[in-house]
């Protein structure tokens, strides 16, 4: 049998396992918790921003970014994000 080529092998370090266990022990599994608050605060300090917000997905991040720059989201707006050089490319819009 051929060995599969794994692009990203599943692995969790002991440190990450500790954070997962802590989230379950304190019942902060969703949607927020101490670790997320700490991450947002530390991230904002590292990048020199007054605030930072952790989101649940790339889609949520794109939606929020578009809203923050004033894009009016209408019936349907789709974006493709190219991996290199990470430029948003507007997709054709469909209006009903």
Image (cartoon, rainbow, N blue to C red):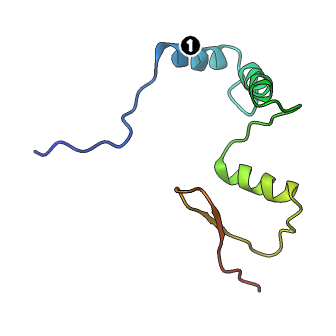
In-image side of 46 versus 10 (left or right): right
Kindly identify the residue that appears in the image at 79 percent across and 53 percent down. 65
For the residue carrying disc 1, how many other residues have a C-alpha within 10 Å: few (<14), some (14-19), or many (20+)?
few
Quadrant of image for the C terminus: bottom right
Kindly identify the residue that appears in the image at 80 percent across and 29 percent down. 44
In-image side of 22 versus 33 (left or right): left
Kindly identify the residue that appears in the image at 81 percent across and 34 percent down. 52
Pick the front one: 27 or 82: 82
In-image side of 65 versus 8 (left or right): right
Query: In which image quadrant can residue 48 be found?
Result: top right
Image x and y of residue 3, in percent = 17, 42
Pick the front one: 49 or 15: 49
Query: In which image quadrant can residue 69 be found?
Result: bottom right
What number of labels is visible? Answer: 1
Q: Is residue 34 above or below residue 77?
A: above
Pick the front one: 36 or 25: 36
Which residue is most to the bottom?
96
Q: Is residue 62 above or below residue 18?
A: below
Image x and y of residue 73, in percent = 83, 68
Element type at marker 1? helix
Q: Which residue is mark 1?
A: 18
Image x and y of residue 14, in percent = 48, 13
Image x and y of residue 72, in percent = 87, 68
Quadrant of image for the N terminus: top left
């Amino acid at each position: 049998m051929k060995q599969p080529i794994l692009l990203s092998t599943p692995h969790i370090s002991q440190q990450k396992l500790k954070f997962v266990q802590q989230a379950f022990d304190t019942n902060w599994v969703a949607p927020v918790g101490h670790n997320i608050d700490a991450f947002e605060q530390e991230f904002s300090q590292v990048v020199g921003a007054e605030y930072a917000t952790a989101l649940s997905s790339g889609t949520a991040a794109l939606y929020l970014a578009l809203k923050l720059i004033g894009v009016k989201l209408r019936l349907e707006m789709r974006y493709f994000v190219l991996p290199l050089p990470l430029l948003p490319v507007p997709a054709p819009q469909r209006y009903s």
